Image (cartoon, rainbow, N blue to C red):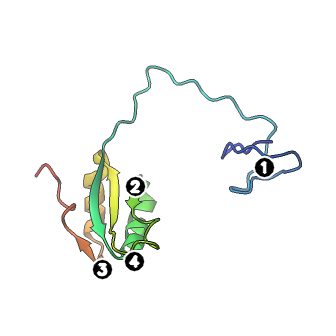
Amino acid sequence: MFCPNCKTEYRPGFTRCADCGAELVDLLPEEEEVTENREPDNDELVPVLQTWDRADVLSIRTALDPVGIEYFIQGEMLSAFRKSDPFVLIVKEKDAEQVRELLKGIKLNYSTSSFNRNPRE
C-alpha cells in the first residue's frame, strides 16, 4: 500500500496515510518522463530581508502566502535552539523585487535593511 501524495509505503492493513490522510493505493502511478524540451528551474535564490523577531515571520508569511510566491525562511526551524541567529527571508531572484514591494507596506518589529535593497543598485 502506498500514499499517492507522499509516496510512503505502508504495511498491509493500513488504509490512510498517517502524514496527509490520503487513502492508500495498491500501486503508485508511473512517474512522468522528463523531456529534454522542458526548461530547468535554475532561478538563483537571494536573501531579501532578515529579522530576529518571530512576529515578523508571521507578518511575512501573511503577506506572501496569498500571492503564491515561493519562499524559504532560513533559521525558522532552529530558532527554538539558537536564539542568536536571525530569520532570513530567501526567494527566487525573479520574485525578489515583487517581494520587496509587498513587504514595503508591512510594519515589522525588527528588521535590517541589509538585504532590502536590490543588490544591482
Q: Nearer the viewer, residue 68 or 85?
A: 85
* Amino acid, disc 1: Glu
- Position of 60 relative to 29 (above/below): below
Mark drawn on residue 109: 3
Disc 2 target residue: 71
Q: Residue at x 32, y 69 (%)?
A: 86
Mark drawn on residue 23: 1
x and y percent of residue 93 in the render?
A: 28, 47
Mark 2 → mark 3, Cα distance in angstroms? 20 Å
Mark 4 → mark 2, Cα distance in angstroms? 17 Å
Task: Evaluate if marks 3 and 4 touch, with contact meaning CB atoms under 8 Å apart.
Answer: yes
Q: Secondary structure at mark 2?
A: strand
Compare marks 4 and 2 and give the one earlier in the sequence: 4
* Amino acid, disc 2: Tyr
Disc 4 target residue: 55
Mark 1 → mark 3, Cα distance in angstroms? 43 Å
- Position of 26 relative to 85 (above/below): above
Q: Residue at x 10, y 52 (%)?
A: 121
Compare marks 3 and 4 and give the one earlier in the sequence: 4
Compare marks 1 and 2 and give the one earlier in the sequence: 1
Neighbours of disc 3 within 10 Å: few (<14), some (14-19), many (20+): few
Q: Secondary structure at mark 4?
A: helix
